[in-house]
Image (tube, rainbow, N blue to C red):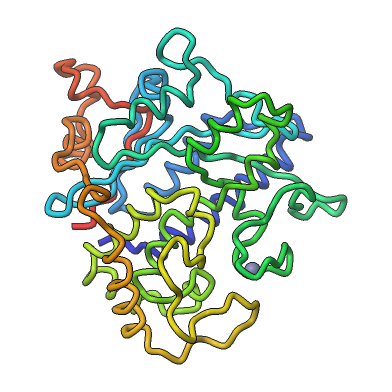
Amino acid sequence: MLNILALAKDLDRLANETWEKITLGDPWGLKFREDSVTDHNLFDLARKHPRLLVDKHSGRREKRSGADWEWWVGSDPLGWVVLRIQAKRLHGFNFSMLDHDGELDHEKQYETLIRQCLGRPGHYPFHVFYSGWADAAGKPAWPSDACWNVCPAGVRPPDCGHAAVGDFGCSVVASSTVAALASSGNPKRHYAPEHLSSSVPWSYLFRLATAKTAGVSVKDLDELHAPWVQTLISERTGDWLDTFQMSLLQAPGLVDTDAPALYGDPPAGGDSGDEGNAPDEDSPERQASDDRAGLSGELSSDDLTRTSELPGYVAALRRDRNRPDPDRGPNTDDLVPMATHTLLLDLG
Ligand SMILES: [Zn+2]
């Protein structure tokens, strides 16, 4: 199966590159278009991770679903969880294009995105923001009026060890949270620091579930030997997918990495959230088992409904990634993707 930790690290690397593209490219007159950033990032992921399949449709499919890309995660036996993602890049201090028109008359793009996920089992709408600012010395700078919500200890960058500022070059937030602010009368409804205050690095989509399944904190994840985590995840794919889906369901709880509200009571003697804490003495296996018991107690089968069969365009991507352009084939609705890019992460 795909190496989840390596994927998360590449998501962070691409986020830092995106941050740099925006901080340097904009003032140099080399402004990257939103689509260009998306094309580059998804191409790079496909190149580095042959098990992650990526396809780009020749036409723009965004208006139909409100999504720039659709990310299928799961397996045939476990079912499929689907992230539908709209990307927005920074212009100055604003995500000024949030109000783009949607599919229907009088509908905003974010409303289309949310509506088109309703009633589809296991589909979740998210926004990914491309951002970047530099201080006078050219170093990544976090806006002083934005919350820094990835630190349970309340430590702001650069001292926080939970994430780097550049990891927010590609940050993710539930579209319902974006819509609530963007549709309000708040004069800061497009203001980037306001939106970043409830977002997390996009690598957190995968880090949270992996840390939880391994029974460690997100901060400690990178210090572990990847093969050990990888073996654990491959043996507990079902648990990982349950936890992944729960974290999406509870977004914007996605923010509170170690918060009891998200994952039940913290294990006794667990990470208090203080920076620089010694690692927990409990064995990871033991802790993972305890956490899993706590988590499963909160789940109901209704929460974890998924799509059981891949639609034609995703099945075709898996069957033959070098297939002929679907536009030239039979143009049945089932073969037309719902977004410009389709990603498939098969855990099976
Ligand atoms: Zn921290």
**Vertical side of 331 occupied by 343: above or below:** below
Q: Position of residue 60 (x, y in %)?
A: 40, 20
170, above or below 96, in the image: below
Relative side of 58 to 15, left or right = left
> As rendered, which of 243 and 95 lies closer to the eye?
243
**Residue 185 lies in quadrant:** top right
Residue 176, relative to residue 337: is it above or below? below
Residue 18 appears left or right of 321? right
Q: Relative to 1, is 280 on the left or the right?
A: right
Instruction: Please provide percent x and percent y for residue 211.
Output: 41, 69
Pick the quarter of the image with the C terminus: bottom left
What residue appears at the point 32 percent right and 31 percent down from the top-left corner? 118
Q: Can residue 30 be seen from the camera position used here?
A: no
| Left or right placement of residue 85 versus residue 79 in this view | right
Work out which residue is located at the far top of the displayed protein and give it. 105
Quadrant including the N terminus: bottom left
- Residue 339 image offset from top left, x and y in percent: 36, 28
| Residue located 18% across and 52% down the image | 75
Judging depth in this view, the residue of 56 and 272 nearest the camera is 272
Q: Quadrant of ligand 1?
A: bottom right
Percent across and percent down for residue 106 are 49, 10
Quick check: can you spot residue 299? yes
Residue at 75 percent across and 29 percent down: it is 29
